[in-house]
Image (cartoon, helix red, strand yellow):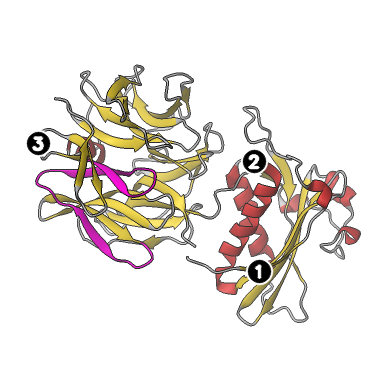
Amino acid sequence: MTLPSSRFVFFLFIWALAFCVCVGFYDKQAEGKLYVDITSPSMRRVPIAVPDFKYIGADNQTPELASKLADILSNDFDISGYFNPLEKESFIEAPGSGITHDSIIFKDWSLIGAELLLKAGYECIGKQLKVEARLFDVFSGRQLYGKRALGPTNQSRQLMHRLANDVIFTLTGHKGPFLTQIAFSGTATGNKEIYISDFDGHNLRQITNHNSISISPRLSLSGERMLYTTFLDSATVLLMRDLAKGSITRLSDKKGLNIAAAWRPGEEEVALTLTTSGNPDIYTISLEGKTLQRLTTNWGIDVSPAFSPDGNKMAFVSNRSGSPQIYILDIKNNSVERLTYQGNYNTSPAWSKLDRIAFSGSSDGNFDLFTIQPDGGGLQRLTKDQGDNEDPCWSPGGRHIAFSSNRNGRKYHIFIANANGDNQRQITFSEGEQFSPSWAYIKE
């Protein structure tokens, strides 16, 4: 099989936005009740209605925000995979209804199949946007969540993401992915540069401008820093970028390869593949670039390190068995066990916070996504008959997965899905290709 150049090179070469949340108000009886069990394998998407926001000020100078704000929330709920936002065309609400319990006719919403109803109002005060949101159980009419929030009008999307996160936490007990960011390598300029967007593909910005080949971005879990490999003067160099300050540290420029880096939990060590001893093996280095430990010693090519949540084990790719497969290294006792046996080419492991490993594998010429338990059990296939699907990475909470796919043609774009493969959707649509995503919280 002829490998795509990016995979071939990779294997062989080896807002801060200040919000003021003013007042929270909700039904005390709703505390402690789990409305959406996201751990259930047969989880049903809950129908939710999010009508246009009501203007609650004296003079509405921004009528376009009524639908814009509602659409952002609906999209967040849809992407989460936990909810089924109903189409606005189905709404039969009376024109005079408001956002409080006594102004809502809940029968209007139950008739169209809504089980949850989010009603909200907004007001623009200078350059500030004030939002008041309430979530109701349609069948009981009980208010489950309520909050007033204030933020810059030009950052309304982030304010809606924050509200969506609050709602998800109220209903599931877990944080949503809405205040996260995804870094990836893209070719929009004709070169491979690093970009970062919000979790939904919006707020896209180019981070590097090396006019070269910059690949394999890896965000720290805190979202403060990013590792990536770039080709400078015909050599690979591992760089670390402080995303707030914009400063760049030349972390590893040893002779040979300096590629495929990964953060060790705690963010004070980095693993990467080096060829300082002649063979591509995995080492850890400090954030000052000092070599700390050689983790693999084998005649094969060892790449793509991914640490367990506690940092005591590491998944990696090696061709020591004759074809690329995934192995698990127990760092404490230096023992190595092979993890994957199905398929003739398994690569790009990613280890989730919930202790599950995602990888890209091939047995029939196409690459698909799989997840597996660290002990080798529970193999699950996430994609099939949808082109090539590669470069998996987990959301910080471990309940969603991002990956690159060429299912819509020859070019690769970034997609996200639930951890079980449901609700797959494309989030990048810019020029060129996008691949090798990395997912982390937005630094606040």
Crowd band around label 3 with a 10 angstrom C-alpha radius: few (<14), some (14–19), many (20+): few
Q: Earlier in the sequence, mark 1 or mark 2?
A: 1
Q: Would you place residue 188 above or below residue 4 in this image? A: below
Q: Locate residue 405: give its quadrant.
A: top left
Label 1 belongs to which residue? 65
Q: At 29% across and 66% down in the image, what residue appears?
A: 247
The amino acid on which the numbered mark 2 sits, given as a three-letter code, is Tyr
Disc 1 and disc 2 in contact, CB within 8 angstroms: no
Q: How many marks overall?
A: 3
Q: Which mark is residue 82?
A: 2
Q: Locate residue 361: give its quadrant.
A: top left
Label 3 belongs to which residue? 277
Q: Is residue 161 visible to the viewer in this orientation of the structure?
A: yes
| Side of 212 relative to 24 (left or right) | left
Give SS at disc 1.
helix
Q: Magenta span has 93?
A: no
Judge by depth and name the residue closer to the eye, 335 or 244. 335
